[in-house]
Image (cartoon, grey):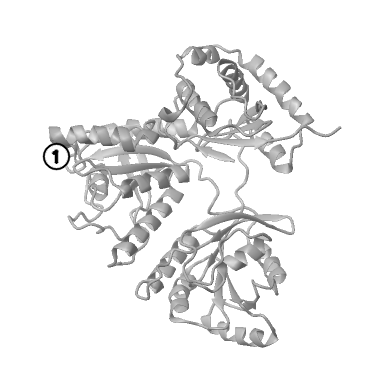
Amino acid sequence: MAQLDNDNPANDDFPEYDDALGERLAGLDEAEAEQRANALRAGLEDYELDEEDVALLEAGQLGEDGITYLPAYPVLAIVGRPNVGKSALVNRILGRREAVVQDVPGVTRDRVSYKAEWNDKRFTLVDTGGWEPDAQGINASVAAQAEVAIDLADAVLFVVDVTVGITATDEHVVKMLRGTDRPVIVVANKSDDDRRDLDAYELWNLGLGEPHPVSALHGRGVADLLDLIVKTLPDTSAVAKQEVGGPRRVAILGRPNVGKSSLLNKAAGEERVVVNDLAGTTRDPVDEQIELGGRVWRFVDTAGIRKRVHLQQGADFYASLRTTAALEKAEVAVVVLDVTEPISVQDLRIIDLVLESGRALVLAYNKWDLLDDDRRRYLEREIEQDLAHVAWAPRVNMSARTGRHLEKLVPALETALESWDTRIPTGKVNAFIAELVQEHPHPVRGGKQPRILFGTQASSQPPTFVLFTTGFLDPQYRRFITRRLREVWGFSGTPIIVNMRVRERRKR
């Protein structure tokens, strides 16, 4: 169970504390703390642990470079037009009902990831949707979603309904698939018998190689398909693996016309992208290396999807796709807000996407030079009410048009990334938990009081902590832990994830 710290700490029932805990932890003998943590770790042997628990505990140990990373599993994306049975195929591959299946086109609207395994090979399965249920936008929408999925996958399953054959929408996606260097497996779904297998041969005309007839509904041919999938996928992902070294990667995000392109141009010192008063003029990819504040940064693609959409609903869909694609490539997101307008639902949705992605966050309040006193009062009230859950994000009041306070962006980025990279030694994590529980134990629920047996920071980027417990911790208590983590170690500019693993004592 994961708890991302996007809840408002102000709603917690637990009192504030001074910095005495931080001072005590700072003065703690690290060797002694590590020794105590090892004793707690040994105590976990009395509890039922699974393979993932053991791998996580081993991954939490520091290597020579300070961090030990687990390899990224290869990524398989499933693409295809609506109602060809992608989600049913996902469920069949997973061996359980996870994806929503309904006999209506467009049920799956977003890309959803699942962990899958076949013949001891693990991989990440991405179920794609994202189309609009209107006849006008369907071709472009399916193709756009496929474009993002292809870019972020090691191999692609292209699913076609063999009972319908090749449609114009299929051809729309095929044009992109032909140009990719990713392996593509053509799946002829709904092939329930030998007669339908003969119909599958028509799919050779797609020019993507041999079609593989399956029935996701009945499971026919799926085992053979999975054998082919695990042969096609690499051992570790070439796209999901963490990029180490090189310039830090920044995504500039925000709703249309808040000044994203102006900010990039001012940072670059030249006209890199077209700036226009019309919303949504950025269409082509912008992936630039820029020197700012004495160091080189890479500003990642914040356009990505080069399609024109005339419906507002469609425009929102593409904006979400562009944001998601940019975040997949970035380490830190600068969310640009137009201070001359009220904070909108779309602004909050973009911030939520950053939180969900686990990237570091900086808030850039743009057009500050146009702010009058009345609007400033309302703005501060909006920030206090609507953005309390990201009060930890560095804030830069600036003007992208004039360059005012642009120099403050670099220290904010550096602070956020330093927090995002931070790793706390296991000894100090457990010393922190021991003091925390002593100063404010978990409330008794139903006559039982859950205990925290052991804690470790499983990874950084973002800081992710795992607590082994004897019972579920209340959401308020998890938020309390998150708040105290911030009070002791800062973590300015990064979300914190607290995972919980409830484990029972071994039966003698």
Q: Quadrant of residue 388?
A: top left
Residue shown at the point (40%, 72%) measured from the top left: 138
Residue shown at the point (29%, 35%) measured from the top left: 383
Q: Residue 245 in the image: x percent, y percent?
A: 48, 40
**Number of numbered discs visible in the structure rendering:** 1
| Amino acid found under the numbered disc labelled 1 | Leu
Say whether residue 5 is left or right of residue 257. right
Say whether residue 243 is left or right of residue 271. right
- In the image as oriented, which residue stretches furthest toward the right? 508
Residue shown at the point (49%, 12%) measured from the top left: 20
Q: Is residue 409 visible?
A: no
Q: Is residue 227 visible?
A: yes
Q: Residue 494 in the image: x percent, y percent?
A: 44, 35
Q: Secondary structure at mark 1?
A: helix
Toward the viewer: 116 or 498? 498
Q: Quadrant of residue 220?
A: bottom right
Instruction: Give the vertical position of 191 relative to 430 (above or below).
Output: below
Say whether residue 479 is left or right of residue 123. left
Q: Residue 7 in the image: x percent, y percent?
A: 44, 36
Instruction: Give the vertical position of 21 relative to 376 (above or below).
Output: above
How crowded pointer 1 is (Cα within 10 Å; few <14, some 14-19, many 20+) is rated as few
Q: Quadrant of residue 295?
A: top left
- Give the quadrant of the N terminus: top right
Toward the viewer: 16 or 85? 16
Q: Residue 294 in the image: x percent, y percent?
A: 32, 34
Toward the viewer: 50 or 378? 378
- Give the quadrant of the C terminus: top right
To which residue does mark 1 refer? Answer: 370
